[in-house]
Amino acid sequence: MLVRILNFFTNLSLIKRFTIASFIVMILGMFSLGRWVAEQIKIGVIKESATTTALYMDSFVTPHLQELGSASSLTAGHFEDLRSVLSEKTLGKQTVAIKIWSPDHYILYSDNPALIGRKFPPTEDLLKAWQGEVVAEVSNLTEEENVEERLGYHKRLLEIYSPVRLNGTNQIIAVTEFYQKVDILEAEIAAAQMRSWLMVGSTMMVIYLFLIGFVRYASNTIEKQEDELKDQVNRLTELLTHNDELNQRVRRSAANATEFNERFLRRTSAELYSGPIQEIELALTRLERVKSQNETCRLINPSVDLLCTDHLPTAKASLRTAMDETRAIAAGLVLPQLECLTLPEILVSVVRAHEQNTGTKVMLSMSDLPEQTPLEIKITAYRLIQEALNNAHNYAGGKGQQVRVRCQTNDILIEVSDLGPGFDVNHPVTSAEREHLGLAGMRERVESLGGSFTIESKINQGTKISAVLTLQNTGENKNG
C-alpha cells in the first residue's frame, strides 16, 4: 500500500506534488498553531476571570482576617462576622464553595463546617498562592479536600487561590480558596477558541492559496523554459549529429584521398618504369652499338670522322644519369605494400630505408603499439617519419636522429627529433622554405585525419616534430 502511494505521488507533476505536500503541511501547522492559540486563550480567560473574582472576593474577606497578622486563628466574633458577610454578600450563583487556609495548612473557615480545623497536604497551587500569586485552574476535584464538592454532583469547577495580605504590608496572612461553576466560563473559552480557529484557518488558507498561485505561476514559467530548453537541446543535438556526420565524411574523404594519392603515385611509378625508363634503356643499348661501330670505324679508317664522334660517350652518360634518376624517383614515389605490414614493421622499414639511403644512424623506440591499424594511419605515419628524417638529414646532418612512437588510449603519438642547429619557430617561414622543409605537407597529412601536429625547435638546440593520430573516427577500411 505504501509503495503504491509513493509511486502515485512520484508520477504526479511538480505542482501537484507541491499542492498535496503543502496542504498536508498547512493542516499540520494550522492544527499545531490552533491548539497553541486555543490553549493560550483558555489560560488567559481563566487568569482574567480568576483575577477579577479574587479582587472582588478580597474586598469582602480581607477586613475580617486582619487579626491573623498577630494570631493563628480567628476569634469567635470575627468568625461570625465572616460567615455573616459571606452569606449575605455571595458572589452569585456561580460560587459553589469557599475555604480560608492558615499558613500551616489548616482550614480556618469553610462553608462546610466539617472541614473547619482540618489539615490537608498543600497542593502546588496553594503553595504558589502563599508566595503571592493568584492561581486558578479548572479542577477535576480529585483532592481529598474536595469531598463536599464531589457530593454536589460537580465534575469540574474553577478553583481559585487568592492570597490575603495584612493591610499596608506585603505579608500574606491567609489564602482564600473558592470554587466557581465553569459553564459560563467554558462557553466563553469555547467561543474565543472558535474565533481563534476561524482566524487561524482563514489566514492559513489565504497564505496557502497565495503560495499555490505563486508556485503555479513559477511552475508554468519553469515548464515553458524547460520546453524551450529541450527544443534548443534537440536542435543542438541535431546540429551536432549533422556536424559529426560531416566530420566523419571529411575524415573518410581525407583517408580516401590519401589512399587515392598513393595509388596515383604507384601508377605513376609503374608508368615511369614501363615508359621513359624502357625508352632510355633502349637508347642506351643503341648507343652501345653506335659506340662499337664507331670504334670499329676508327680502327678501319682513322681518317674518317663522319661516323666517329666524341659526343656519343657524353650522350650515353647523360642517358644513364637520367635513367638512374628516373628510377630513383619512381622508387621513391611508391610505398611498400603497407596493407600486409603491421605498424611496427612499417616503422622499422622506413627507418632502415633512411639509414641505407643516407648512411646515418636513427634511434627507434616503440611501445604498446596495436596490431591492427587503419591503412590511412600507416600511410600517414610512414610519410611523416620519412619526410621528418629527410629534413633531419638535410638540415641537421643526421645528428642525433630519434624516432619515438607509442600508443596512448586511442592515440598514436609520434616524435621525430634531432640535435641539429634548429630554427626559430616564431620566425615567419617563406613559401620556398616551407615547401622545401615539407612542414606544411606533414601538418596537412596529420590534420586531415583529425590529428594534431606541433613543432618544437630552438637555435642550436635541435628540432622535435610531434604528431598525434587518432585511431577512432578514421577511414572505414581497417587493415592489420
Image: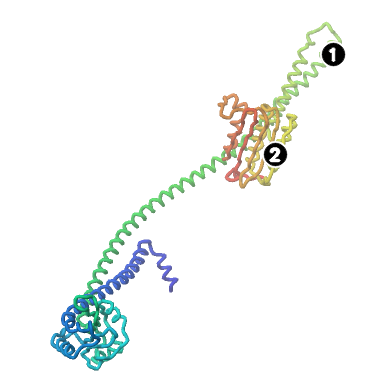
What residue does disc 2 label? 347
Residue 445: % across, % down: 60, 35
Q: Quadrant of the N terminus?
A: bottom left
| Image vertical order of residue 282 relative to residue 99, above or below | above
Q: Residue furthest right?
A: 300
Q: Residue furthest front?
A: 70
User: What residue appears at the point 29 percent right and 78 percent down from the top-left corner?
Assistant: 128
User: What residue appears at the point 66 percent right and 43 percent down from the top-left corner?
Assistant: 406
Q: Quadrant of residue 342?
A: top right
The amino acid sitting under disc 1 is: Thr
Tell me which colouring the rendered structure shows: rainbow
Residue 173: % across, % down: 24, 81
Q: Is residue 129 left or right of residue 321?
A: left
| Image vertical order of residue 194 relative to residue 464, above or below | below
Q: Quadrant of the C terminus?
A: top right
Residue 50: % across, % down: 22, 78
As rendered, which of 57 and 387 lies closer to the eye? 57
Circle 1: is it few (<14), some (14-19), or many (20+) Cα within 10 Å?
few
What residue does disc 1 label? 296
Q: Is residue 442 left or right of residue 118?
A: right
N-terminal-most mark, 2 or 1: 1
Circle 2: is it few (<14), some (14-19), or many (20+) Cα within 10 Å?
many
Q: Describe the element under mark 2 as helix, strand or loop.
A: helix
Determine if residue 285 is in view: yes
Residue 44: % across, % down: 24, 74
